Amino acid sequence: MRIYDIIAHKRDGLELSDEEIAFFVKGYTAGEIKDYHAAALVMAIYLRGMTDRETITLTNEMAHSGEMLDLSSCGGVTVDKHSTGGVGDKTTLVVAPVVAALGARVAKMSGRGLGHTGGTVDKLESINGFRTELSPEEFIEQVKKIGICVVGQSGNLAPADKLLYALRDATATVGSIPLIASSIMSKKLAAGAQCIVLDVKTGSGAFMKTVEQAEQLSRKMVDIGNACGRKVAALITDMNTPLGNNIGNTLEVMEAVEVLNGKGPEDLREVCVALASNIISLSENMTPEKAESEVRRVLADGSALSKLSQLVEMQGGSVSQIQNTELLPKAKFCHEVLSPADGCISFMNAEKIGSSSVILGAGRVNKGDSIDYTAGIILHKKTGDCVRKGEVLAELFSNNKAAFAESEKHFVSAFEFSENKPAIIPLIYKVIR
Protein backbone atom coordinates (compact mmCIF):
# COMPACT_ATOMS: atom_id res chain seq x y z
CA MET A 1 0.00 0.00 0.00
CA ARG A 2 1.27 3.47 -0.94
CA ILE A 3 0.29 6.85 0.47
CA TYR A 4 0.43 8.17 -3.12
CA ASP A 5 -2.46 5.90 -4.12
CA ILE A 6 -4.50 6.82 -1.03
CA ILE A 7 -4.12 10.52 -1.89
CA ALA A 8 -5.16 9.85 -5.48
CA HIS A 9 -8.23 7.87 -4.38
CA LYS A 10 -9.51 10.68 -2.19
CA ARG A 11 -8.57 13.33 -4.77
CA ASP A 12 -10.81 11.52 -7.25
CA GLY A 13 -13.70 11.37 -4.78
CA LEU A 14 -13.43 7.68 -3.91
CA GLU A 15 -14.26 6.25 -0.50
CA LEU A 16 -11.16 5.19 1.41
CA SER A 17 -11.10 1.70 2.91
CA ASP A 18 -10.57 1.04 6.61
CA GLU A 19 -7.16 -0.36 5.75
CA GLU A 20 -6.14 2.77 3.83
CA ILE A 21 -7.18 5.06 6.69
CA ALA A 22 -5.36 2.89 9.24
CA PHE A 23 -2.24 2.84 7.06
CA PHE A 24 -2.25 6.65 6.89
CA VAL A 25 -2.84 7.29 10.61
CA LYS A 26 -0.26 4.72 11.76
CA GLY A 27 2.30 5.85 9.21
CA TYR A 28 1.92 9.55 9.91
CA THR A 29 2.05 9.07 13.69
CA ALA A 30 5.21 6.99 13.34
CA GLY A 31 6.86 9.60 11.11
CA GLU A 32 6.95 7.25 8.12
CA ILE A 33 4.55 9.43 6.09
CA LYS A 34 5.86 12.92 5.38
CA ASP A 35 4.07 16.20 6.08
CA TYR A 36 3.72 16.99 2.37
CA HIS A 37 1.90 13.69 1.75
CA ALA A 38 -0.33 14.21 4.80
CA ALA A 39 -1.08 17.79 3.74
CA ALA A 40 -2.14 16.59 0.29
CA LEU A 41 -4.48 13.99 1.78
CA VAL A 42 -5.98 16.41 4.29
CA MET A 43 -6.68 18.92 1.51
CA ALA A 44 -8.31 16.17 -0.57
CA ILE A 45 -10.52 15.30 2.44
CA TYR A 46 -11.34 18.99 2.94
CA LEU A 47 -12.46 19.29 -0.70
CA ARG A 48 -14.08 15.86 -1.18
CA GLY A 49 -15.44 15.15 2.30
CA MET A 50 -15.76 11.78 4.03
CA THR A 51 -18.57 9.29 4.44
CA ASP A 52 -19.86 8.40 7.91
CA ARG A 53 -17.93 5.13 7.82
CA GLU A 54 -14.70 6.87 6.83
CA THR A 55 -15.12 9.45 9.60
CA ILE A 56 -15.81 6.79 12.24
CA THR A 57 -12.78 4.78 11.12
CA LEU A 58 -10.54 7.86 11.11
CA THR A 59 -11.73 8.78 14.62
CA ASN A 60 -11.13 5.29 15.97
CA GLU A 61 -7.65 5.08 14.45
CA MET A 62 -6.72 8.50 15.84
CA ALA A 63 -8.08 7.57 19.29
CA HIS A 64 -6.01 4.37 19.30
CA SER A 65 -2.84 6.10 18.06
CA GLY A 66 -1.74 6.54 21.69
CA GLU A 67 -2.85 5.73 25.20
CA MET A 68 -6.49 4.72 25.76
CA LEU A 69 -7.42 5.61 29.34
CA ASP A 70 -9.20 2.79 31.18
CA LEU A 71 -11.69 4.25 33.67
CA SER A 72 -13.41 0.96 34.49
CA SER A 73 -11.98 0.95 38.02
CA CYS A 74 -13.51 4.37 38.85
CA GLY A 75 -16.84 2.86 39.88
CA GLY A 76 -20.18 4.17 38.61
CA VAL A 77 -20.73 5.79 35.22
CA THR A 78 -17.88 8.00 33.99
CA VAL A 79 -18.91 11.22 32.24
CA ASP A 80 -17.25 14.01 30.29
CA LYS A 81 -18.34 17.34 28.83
CA HIS A 82 -16.74 19.18 25.93
CA SER A 83 -17.28 22.69 24.60
CA THR A 84 -16.23 23.74 21.13
CA GLY A 85 -15.03 27.04 22.63
CA GLY A 86 -16.51 30.42 23.40
CA VAL A 87 -16.20 33.68 25.32
CA GLY A 88 -17.08 33.70 29.01
CA ASP A 89 -17.69 29.95 28.85
CA LYS A 90 -17.00 28.82 32.41
CA THR A 91 -19.66 26.08 32.33
CA THR A 92 -17.29 23.23 33.28
CA LEU A 93 -16.61 24.94 36.62
CA VAL A 94 -20.34 24.64 37.37
CA VAL A 95 -21.43 21.52 35.50
CA ALA A 96 -18.64 19.20 36.68
CA PRO A 97 -19.29 19.65 40.44
CA VAL A 98 -23.07 19.57 39.88
CA VAL A 99 -23.07 16.17 38.18
CA ALA A 100 -20.43 14.81 40.59
CA ALA A 101 -22.70 15.84 43.48
CA LEU A 102 -25.40 13.69 41.85
CA GLY A 103 -23.21 10.59 41.70
CA ALA A 104 -21.72 10.73 38.20
CA ARG A 105 -17.97 10.12 37.98
CA VAL A 106 -16.42 13.17 36.29
CA ALA A 107 -13.12 12.21 34.67
CA LYS A 108 -12.30 15.29 32.62
CA MET A 109 -9.29 16.37 30.62
CA SER A 110 -9.47 20.02 29.56
CA GLY A 111 -7.47 22.36 27.40
CA ARG A 112 -5.94 25.81 27.70
CA GLY A 113 -7.29 28.93 26.05
CA LEU A 114 -6.00 30.05 22.66
CA GLY A 115 -7.07 33.11 20.68
CA HIS A 116 -10.40 34.62 21.71
CA THR A 117 -11.63 31.46 23.50
CA GLY A 118 -10.83 30.64 27.12
CA GLY A 119 -9.65 27.33 28.58
CA THR A 120 -10.82 25.50 31.70
CA VAL A 121 -7.26 24.62 32.77
CA ASP A 122 -6.31 28.32 32.86
CA LYS A 123 -9.37 29.18 34.94
CA LEU A 124 -8.56 26.47 37.49
CA GLU A 125 -4.89 27.45 37.63
CA SER A 126 -5.94 31.00 38.53
CA ILE A 127 -6.86 29.52 41.94
CA ASN A 128 -3.70 29.61 44.06
CA GLY A 129 -1.93 26.24 44.16
CA PHE A 130 -4.34 24.32 41.90
CA ARG A 131 -2.54 21.42 40.15
CA THR A 132 -3.74 20.42 36.68
CA GLU A 133 -0.91 18.00 35.93
CA LEU A 134 -1.58 14.63 37.56
CA SER A 135 -0.35 11.17 36.64
CA PRO A 136 -2.95 8.77 35.17
CA GLU A 137 -2.84 6.87 38.46
CA GLU A 138 -3.52 10.03 40.52
CA PHE A 139 -6.27 11.01 38.09
CA ILE A 140 -8.13 7.70 38.41
CA GLU A 141 -7.58 7.49 42.17
CA GLN A 142 -9.12 10.93 42.68
CA VAL A 143 -12.17 10.06 40.58
CA LYS A 144 -12.61 6.90 42.68
CA LYS A 145 -12.23 8.88 45.92
CA ILE A 146 -14.37 12.00 45.38
CA GLY A 147 -16.06 11.42 42.01
CA ILE A 148 -14.39 14.30 40.18
CA CYS A 149 -11.02 15.24 38.69
CA VAL A 150 -10.20 17.91 36.09
CA VAL A 151 -6.71 17.95 34.59
CA GLY A 152 -4.82 19.17 31.54
CA GLN A 153 -4.79 16.99 28.46
CA SER A 154 -2.27 14.14 28.56
CA GLY A 155 0.50 14.21 25.98
CA ASN A 156 -0.10 10.54 25.25
CA LEU A 157 -3.77 10.79 24.25
CA ALA A 158 -4.52 10.76 20.51
CA PRO A 159 -1.06 11.87 19.29
CA ALA A 160 -2.28 11.52 15.69
CA ASP A 161 -4.79 14.28 16.36
CA LYS A 162 -2.09 16.64 17.65
CA LEU A 163 -0.08 16.10 14.48
CA LEU A 164 -3.06 16.46 12.17
CA TYR A 165 -4.42 19.52 13.96
CA ALA A 166 -1.11 21.36 13.59
CA LEU A 167 -1.04 20.38 9.90
CA ARG A 168 -4.65 21.53 9.33
CA ASP A 169 -3.91 24.82 11.06
CA ALA A 170 -0.98 25.44 8.69
CA THR A 171 -2.79 24.38 5.50
CA ALA A 172 -6.14 26.22 5.81
CA THR A 173 -8.08 22.96 6.24
CA VAL A 174 -9.39 23.43 9.80
CA GLY A 175 -12.98 23.98 8.65
CA SER A 176 -13.76 20.45 7.48
CA ILE A 177 -16.68 18.94 9.43
CA PRO A 178 -15.36 15.33 9.28
CA LEU A 179 -11.89 16.47 10.41
CA ILE A 180 -13.28 18.63 13.23
CA ALA A 181 -15.56 15.81 14.40
CA SER A 182 -12.79 13.20 14.34
CA SER A 183 -10.39 15.56 16.13
CA ILE A 184 -12.80 16.23 19.01
CA MET A 185 -14.17 12.71 19.33
CA SER A 186 -10.80 10.93 19.09
CA LYS A 187 -9.69 12.74 22.25
CA LYS A 188 -13.01 12.05 23.99
CA LEU A 189 -12.82 8.33 23.14
CA ALA A 190 -9.20 8.09 24.28
CA ALA A 191 -10.10 9.82 27.57
CA GLY A 192 -12.36 6.88 28.37
CA ALA A 193 -15.69 8.35 29.60
CA GLN A 194 -18.83 6.31 28.98
CA CYS A 195 -21.17 9.31 28.63
CA ILE A 196 -20.22 12.48 26.76
CA VAL A 197 -22.19 15.71 26.43
CA LEU A 198 -21.02 18.17 23.80
CA ASP A 199 -21.66 21.91 23.98
CA VAL A 200 -21.48 23.00 20.34
CA LYS A 201 -21.35 26.78 20.16
CA THR A 202 -22.74 28.79 17.25
CA GLY A 203 -22.59 32.50 16.43
CA SER A 204 -20.10 35.34 16.15
CA GLY A 205 -17.85 34.05 18.94
CA ALA A 206 -17.89 30.41 17.81
CA PHE A 207 -16.07 28.45 15.14
CA MET A 208 -19.44 27.30 13.75
CA LYS A 209 -20.97 30.61 12.66
CA THR A 210 -24.40 29.23 11.71
CA VAL A 211 -26.87 26.92 13.45
CA GLU A 212 -26.87 24.71 10.35
CA GLN A 213 -23.10 24.19 10.56
CA ALA A 214 -23.34 23.50 14.29
CA GLU A 215 -26.10 20.95 13.76
CA GLN A 216 -24.12 19.18 11.04
CA LEU A 217 -21.08 18.92 13.34
CA SER A 218 -23.23 17.86 16.32
CA ARG A 219 -24.94 15.04 14.46
CA LYS A 220 -21.62 13.80 13.11
CA MET A 221 -20.08 13.66 16.61
CA VAL A 222 -23.13 12.01 18.18
CA ASP A 223 -23.11 9.37 15.43
CA ILE A 224 -19.39 8.73 15.95
CA GLY A 225 -19.82 8.35 19.70
CA ASN A 226 -22.79 6.01 19.37
CA ALA A 227 -20.98 3.89 16.77
CA CYS A 228 -18.05 3.58 19.20
CA GLY A 229 -20.22 2.41 22.09
CA ARG A 230 -20.56 5.69 24.02
CA LYS A 231 -23.70 7.53 25.07
CA VAL A 232 -23.50 10.99 23.52
CA ALA A 233 -25.69 14.09 23.42
CA ALA A 234 -24.99 17.47 21.84
CA LEU A 235 -26.48 20.84 22.75
CA ILE A 236 -26.27 23.63 20.20
CA THR A 237 -25.90 26.82 22.26
CA ASP A 238 -25.62 30.49 21.37
CA MET A 239 -22.29 32.31 21.26
CA ASN A 240 -23.31 35.54 19.54
CA THR A 241 -23.16 37.10 23.01
CA PRO A 242 -20.58 36.16 25.68
CA LEU A 243 -21.93 33.73 28.27
CA GLY A 244 -22.46 35.40 31.63
CA ASN A 245 -20.95 38.79 32.46
CA ASN A 246 -17.35 37.95 33.38
CA ILE A 247 -14.58 37.23 30.86
CA GLY A 248 -11.09 36.30 32.09
CA ASN A 249 -9.79 33.59 34.37
CA THR A 250 -10.21 34.72 38.00
CA LEU A 251 -13.27 36.74 37.01
CA GLU A 252 -14.88 33.62 35.56
CA VAL A 253 -14.08 31.56 38.67
CA MET A 254 -15.89 34.23 40.71
CA GLU A 255 -18.95 34.03 38.48
CA ALA A 256 -19.01 30.22 38.49
CA VAL A 257 -19.01 30.26 42.29
CA GLU A 258 -21.92 32.73 42.19
CA VAL A 259 -23.94 30.22 40.13
CA LEU A 260 -23.02 27.41 42.55
CA ASN A 261 -24.33 29.69 45.31
CA GLY A 262 -27.70 29.80 43.55
CA LYS A 263 -27.07 33.25 42.04
CA GLY A 264 -25.20 34.48 38.96
CA PRO A 265 -26.39 35.58 35.50
CA GLU A 266 -29.50 33.84 34.21
CA ASP A 267 -28.02 32.91 30.81
CA LEU A 268 -25.02 31.16 32.37
CA ARG A 269 -27.19 29.41 34.95
CA GLU A 270 -29.66 28.09 32.38
CA VAL A 271 -26.99 26.75 29.99
CA CYS A 272 -25.26 25.01 32.92
CA VAL A 273 -28.56 23.47 34.06
CA ALA A 274 -29.24 22.19 30.53
CA LEU A 275 -25.77 20.66 30.14
CA ALA A 276 -25.81 19.05 33.59
CA SER A 277 -29.35 17.74 33.12
CA ASN A 278 -28.39 16.03 29.87
CA ILE A 279 -25.35 14.41 31.49
CA ILE A 280 -27.45 13.08 34.39
CA SER A 281 -30.25 11.96 32.09
CA LEU A 282 -27.75 9.99 29.98
CA SER A 283 -25.64 8.56 32.78
CA GLU A 284 -28.40 7.72 35.26
CA ASN A 285 -31.11 6.73 32.72
CA MET A 286 -33.31 9.45 34.20
CA THR A 287 -36.06 11.40 32.44
CA PRO A 288 -34.95 14.88 31.36
CA GLU A 289 -37.51 16.44 33.71
CA LYS A 290 -36.32 14.45 36.73
CA ALA A 291 -32.67 15.16 35.85
CA GLU A 292 -33.32 18.90 35.70
CA SER A 293 -35.10 18.80 39.05
CA GLU A 294 -32.12 17.04 40.64
CA VAL A 295 -29.65 19.50 39.09
CA ARG A 296 -31.57 22.48 40.46
CA ARG A 297 -31.73 20.79 43.87
CA VAL A 298 -27.94 20.43 44.26
CA LEU A 299 -27.45 24.01 43.08
CA ALA A 300 -29.91 25.21 45.71
CA ASP A 301 -28.77 23.11 48.68
CA GLY A 302 -25.03 23.85 48.40
CA SER A 303 -23.86 20.31 47.67
CA ALA A 304 -22.53 21.26 44.22
CA LEU A 305 -20.49 24.11 45.72
CA SER A 306 -19.14 21.70 48.35
CA LYS A 307 -18.05 19.37 45.55
CA LEU A 308 -16.12 22.21 43.86
CA SER A 309 -14.39 22.94 47.19
CA GLN A 310 -13.53 19.26 47.48
CA LEU A 311 -12.08 19.24 43.94
CA VAL A 312 -9.97 22.34 44.66
CA GLU A 313 -8.69 20.92 47.95
CA MET A 314 -7.75 17.55 46.43
CA GLN A 315 -5.75 19.24 43.67
CA GLY A 316 -3.84 21.55 46.01
CA GLY A 317 -5.84 24.73 45.44
CA SER A 318 -6.88 27.37 47.94
CA VAL A 319 -10.34 26.39 49.23
CA SER A 320 -10.57 29.75 51.02
CA GLN A 321 -10.65 31.44 47.61
CA ILE A 322 -13.75 29.41 46.73
CA GLN A 323 -15.40 30.08 50.07
CA ASN A 324 -14.65 33.79 49.65
CA THR A 325 -13.86 34.79 46.06
CA GLU A 326 -12.77 38.25 47.23
CA LEU A 327 -9.51 36.48 48.19
CA LEU A 328 -8.77 35.67 44.54
CA PRO A 329 -6.03 37.89 43.07
CA LYS A 330 -7.15 41.09 41.35
CA ALA A 331 -5.70 43.26 38.60
CA LYS A 332 -4.02 46.51 39.61
CA PHE A 333 -5.92 48.68 37.13
CA CYS A 334 -9.57 49.07 36.10
CA HIS A 335 -10.94 51.14 33.20
CA GLU A 336 -14.60 51.88 32.43
CA VAL A 337 -15.84 51.72 28.83
CA LEU A 338 -18.67 54.18 28.16
CA SER A 339 -21.38 53.84 25.54
CA PRO A 340 -20.64 55.92 22.43
CA ALA A 341 -24.34 56.30 21.61
CA ASP A 342 -27.94 56.21 22.83
CA GLY A 343 -30.01 53.21 21.83
CA CYS A 344 -30.56 49.51 22.31
CA ILE A 345 -27.69 47.09 21.86
CA SER A 346 -28.78 45.09 18.82
CA PHE A 347 -25.63 42.99 18.36
CA MET A 348 -22.40 42.10 20.15
CA ASN A 349 -19.56 40.44 18.28
CA ALA A 350 -18.41 37.92 20.88
CA GLU A 351 -15.18 37.15 19.01
CA LYS A 352 -14.10 40.81 19.11
CA ILE A 353 -14.97 41.01 22.82
CA GLY A 354 -12.91 37.88 23.46
CA SER A 355 -10.03 39.43 21.51
CA SER A 356 -10.34 42.56 23.66
CA SER A 357 -9.70 40.42 26.74
CA VAL A 358 -6.64 38.89 25.03
CA ILE A 359 -5.23 42.39 24.50
CA LEU A 360 -5.62 42.98 28.26
CA GLY A 361 -3.53 39.85 28.91
CA ALA A 362 -6.30 37.31 29.65
CA GLY A 363 -5.54 35.03 26.68
CA ARG A 364 -2.89 33.75 24.31
CA VAL A 365 -2.07 34.52 20.71
CA ASN A 366 0.33 31.54 20.50
CA LYS A 367 0.57 28.33 22.48
CA GLY A 368 3.04 28.78 25.31
CA ASP A 369 2.31 32.51 25.78
CA SER A 370 2.03 33.55 29.42
CA ILE A 371 -1.27 35.02 30.57
CA ASP A 372 -2.44 37.42 33.27
CA TYR A 373 -5.00 35.44 35.30
CA THR A 374 -6.48 38.65 36.73
CA ALA A 375 -7.03 40.40 33.39
CA GLY A 376 -10.45 40.48 31.78
CA ILE A 377 -13.79 42.20 31.33
CA ILE A 378 -16.98 42.55 33.37
CA LEU A 379 -19.92 43.35 31.11
CA HIS A 380 -22.51 45.77 32.48
CA LYS A 381 -24.70 45.74 29.35
CA LYS A 382 -25.47 43.01 26.82
CA THR A 383 -27.55 42.48 23.70
CA GLY A 384 -31.12 43.70 24.24
CA ASP A 385 -30.20 46.29 26.89
CA CYS A 386 -30.97 49.96 26.18
CA VAL A 387 -28.32 52.51 27.12
CA ARG A 388 -27.62 56.23 27.20
CA LYS A 389 -24.51 57.77 25.70
CA GLY A 390 -21.85 57.85 28.42
CA GLU A 391 -23.37 54.98 30.40
CA VAL A 392 -20.92 52.24 31.46
CA LEU A 393 -20.87 49.29 29.04
CA ALA A 394 -18.12 47.36 30.80
CA GLU A 395 -15.12 47.43 33.09
CA LEU A 396 -11.72 46.37 31.76
CA PHE A 397 -9.12 44.87 34.13
CA SER A 398 -5.39 44.51 33.55
CA ASN A 399 -1.98 44.84 35.17
CA ASN A 400 -0.86 46.62 31.99
CA LYS A 401 -2.43 50.08 31.98
CA ALA A 402 -1.13 50.75 28.47
CA ALA A 403 -3.37 47.98 27.07
CA PHE A 404 -6.63 49.80 27.84
CA ALA A 405 -6.67 52.10 24.79
CA GLU A 406 -6.32 49.33 22.21
CA SER A 407 -8.64 46.97 24.10
CA GLU A 408 -11.35 49.64 24.44
CA LYS A 409 -11.19 50.46 20.73
CA HIS A 410 -11.56 46.78 19.86
CA PHE A 411 -14.33 46.31 22.43
CA VAL A 412 -16.49 49.24 21.29
CA SER A 413 -16.25 48.10 17.66
CA ALA A 414 -18.04 44.88 18.70
CA PHE A 415 -21.29 46.75 19.47
CA GLU A 416 -24.15 47.72 17.18
CA PHE A 417 -27.00 49.98 18.34
CA SER A 418 -30.55 50.48 17.08
CA GLU A 419 -33.71 52.32 18.13
CA ASN A 420 -35.60 49.14 18.97
CA LYS A 421 -34.76 46.05 20.98
CA PRO A 422 -33.61 43.10 18.83
CA ALA A 423 -35.48 39.81 18.60
CA ILE A 424 -34.60 37.42 21.42
CA ILE A 425 -32.04 34.79 20.39
CA PRO A 426 -32.46 31.39 22.06
CA LEU A 427 -29.75 30.26 24.48
CA ILE A 428 -30.17 26.65 23.35
CA TYR A 429 -31.16 26.00 19.75
CA LYS A 430 -31.40 22.23 19.78
CA VAL A 431 -30.54 19.06 21.73
CA ILE A 432 -29.34 16.10 19.64
CA ARG A 433 -29.32 12.67 21.25
Image (tube, grey):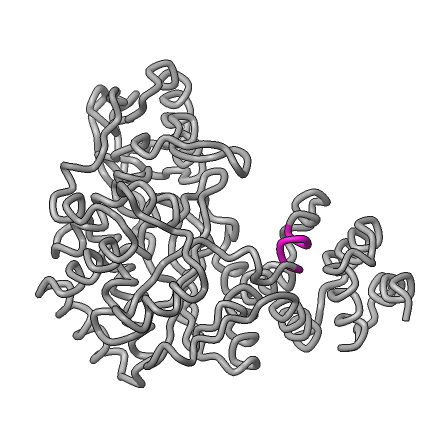
Q: Is residue 383 left or right of residue 353?
A: left
Looking at the picture, does residue 73 appear above or below residue 23?
A: below
Q: Is residue 187 left or right of residue 262?
A: right
Q: Which of the 4 image quarters holds residue 80?
A: bottom left
- Residue at 50 percent across and 71 percent down: it is 69
- Residue at 17 percent across and 56 percent down: it is 260
Looking at the picture, does residue 218 appear above or below residue 353?
A: below
Residue 421 shows up from this direction: no
107 or 229, which is in the foreground? 107
Q: Which of the 4 image quarters holds residue 201?
A: bottom left
The C terminus - image quarter: bottom left
**Residue lying farthest to the bottom in this orientation:** 285
Q: Is residue 257 left or right of residue 66?
A: left
307 or 205, which is in the foreground? 307
The residue segment tinted magenta is 160-165
- Residue at 40 percent across and 63 percent down: it is 108
394 drawn magenta: no
Q: Is residue 304 left or right of residue 252?
A: left
Where's residue 125, x and y in %? Answer: 34, 44
158 or 242, which is in the foreground? 158
Looking at the picture, does residue 95 appear above or below residue 335?
A: below
Where's residue 256, x and y in %? Answer: 23, 50
The N terminus - image quarter: bottom right
Where's residue 174, x and y in %? Answer: 64, 50
162 drawn magenta: yes
